[in-house]
Image (cartoon, rainbow, N blue to C red):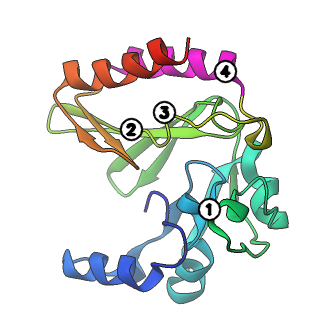
Amino acid sequence: MVDSGSGRSSRILENNIRAAGLDPHKISRLILTHCHIDHIGSAPYFRSEFGCKILIHEEDAEAIETGDQLLTAANWYETEFPPTEIDEKLKGDSGCLNFGKEKLSWLHTPGHTPGSICLYLDRGGRRILFGQDIHGPFLPSFRSDMGKWEESMEKLLLLKADVLCEGHFGIFQPQDRVTAYIKKYLQHNS
């Protein structure tokens, strides 16, 4: 599972998973793309209800483990996030997670937060990119870094993704629309 919503919709997410014909008990790992509440909020619920492991890049792990209300942006949503243990801290610039015969690659894409990551997989001759919060926002309280963000976006463009699943603005395809979406923010934020 990639990200887990803001926490107020845990049961809705569970019901959506079941409605799609999937069993939430089969979620082995919950991969968090960064430490903000709108992406991590239901992580404690999914771990306690279904026993999945929580993964995040080491650069964003402390915010979750300490329940830091500013770094998790929980204060933006007038909610709280409890200190939550991380089962696996992703280290370095990239890696691969294996799920049986499936392979999910991750890429460290700092900028929005120090530990932001994007994920991608190749299926049916197409590359599918999970790129959350490519658009920002970029704030000192998030420890944002525009220089690193620009480098991260250039890395994403090199992936030549055919499909972009962006957590806030939907799904973009084919490849030229994915490229245009990323370049739009590069131009806007330069």
Location of the N terminus by quadrant is: bottom left
Nearest to N terminus: mark 4 or mark 1: 1
Q: Residues within 10 Å of mark 1 (few under 14, many from 20)?
A: many
**Gap in angstroms between the C-alphas marked 3 and 1:** 17 Å
Instruction: Classify mark 2: helix, strand or loop.
Output: strand
Q: Mark 4, mark 2: which one is toward the viewer?
A: 4
Which secondary structure class fits the magenta region best? helix
Q: Which mark is residue 135?
A: 3
Image position of 59 (left or right of 118): right
Q: Mark 4 is on which residue type? A: Met
Location of the C terminus by quadrant is: top right
Q: Mark 3 is on which residue type? A: His
Q: 102 or 43, which lies in front?
A: 43
Image position of 35 (left or right of 13): right
Q: Which mark is residue 146?
A: 4
Q: 35 or 142, which lies in front?
A: 142
